[in-house]
Image (cartoon, helix red, strand yellow):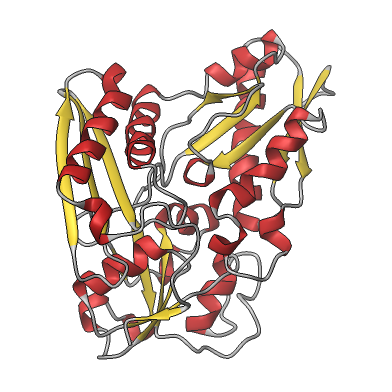
Amino acid sequence: MTSAMPASRTIRLGTRASALATAQSGMIARTLEEAAAAAGERVGVELVPVRTQGDVDPSSLARLGGVGAFAAALRMALLDGHCDLAVHSFKDLPTAPVDGLRVWAVPRREDPFDALCARNGWGLDDLPRGARVGTGSPRRAAQLLLRRPDLRIVDIRGNVPTRLSRVLGAGVWPDGPLGARQPDLDGVVLAMAGLNRLGLTAHVTEAFDEDVMLPAAAQGALAVEARIDADPLLTSLLTTLDHAATRAEAVAERAVMGGLEAGCAAPVGALARADERGLVLDAAVISVRGTEAVRSRLRATDLGDAEALGHRVASELLAQGAGGIADLRATKPHRSEAGQ
């Protein structure tokens, strides 16, 4: 990033090289530079691309060890001193902490929900019987099948434009063509946050709410991570980015995953909402074929009780038999095409 005058200090921000990761990191970089300028500091933020296993391995994301595959290289770059901070999609960050690192900031959340991008302007209920819908997420697949058991769910990988190209063909997006392949799907399910950040919301044919599809824990939220011993200037700038309500929501949702001891491919959805009365948390576990589901919704009156709320919801889900309807420790999809 650039500043109005030469920077007296450069902060290195590690990021994946994908368009979405770069957009997210660029937003954080600009905000940090603005915060520094407001504090009378001349700081520049340099984006440092970090190639991750998840970017280069062509196999399914969940078979890479899931969410941890995208976070591990960034965390190693932090610990090795190759960068000063890293921006993660919070949903991609394993729930277990890493010695020497800390999430210093959770900025205000983007839209947490998922959306359908389908041919012919179809919504979920409009899709023809047996339509092929792409997603790399067992959570999304299970909830699609819960509502539409006739759908054929196709496991897909790739960045957002690549996934869209499987529905739209080459198409066009703000940075160029979506891709060169022929469309082979009737629709794909993607996160609204990513579509928003890439300027691709025009392709949304149905934006889901919690009644149709609960999002992944911390979906739409970013986590800005740095070393525990980061210098005071950096940590003071990072604290200006932190949004208390978003952090509480993410903590509660991730505590559900922790309480369930859920793996990266477990079909679990969770959504917390902070309001004037505290925090309400809604979570569900769905069988991979969408034939069964258990759900819990509880409230806490204090944002500081977010983690305890998540554990309470997890306990209630387990009491309802969550462990019997889904493999909660799943780290890979059961099959690449389901619901046939």
Q: Nearer the viewer, residue 47 or 227?
A: 227
Q: Is residue 55 above or below residue 128?
A: above
Residue depicted at 67% across the width and 25% down the height: 33
Q: Residue 41 at x, y = what percent?
A: 72, 12
Query: In the picture provided, is 43 more to the left or to the right than 156?
Result: right
Query: In the picture provided, is 69 more to the left or to the right than 160?
Result: right
Q: Nearer the viewer, residue 327 or 76?
A: 327
Q: Is residue 250 above or below residue 278?
A: below
Q: Residue 232 at x, y = what percent?
A: 68, 8
Quadrant showing the C terminus: bottom left
Residue depicted at 67% across the width and 43% down the height: 72
Q: Is residue 1 visible?
A: no
Q: Residue 22 at x, y = what percent?
A: 66, 49
Residue 145's quadrant in the figure?
bottom left
Q: Residue 181 at x, y = what percent?
A: 62, 86
Q: Is residue 297 visible?
A: yes
Q: How many marks?
A: 0
Residue 250's quadrant in the figure?
top left
Q: Nearer the viewer, residue 220 or 306?
A: 306
Q: Is residue 197 above or below residue 179?
A: above
Residue depicted at 25% across the width and 85% down the height: 150
Quadrant showing the N terminus: top right
Residue sticking out furthest to the front: 324
Q: Nearer the viewer, residue 134 or 117?
A: 134
Q: Is residue 42 above or below residue 54?
A: above
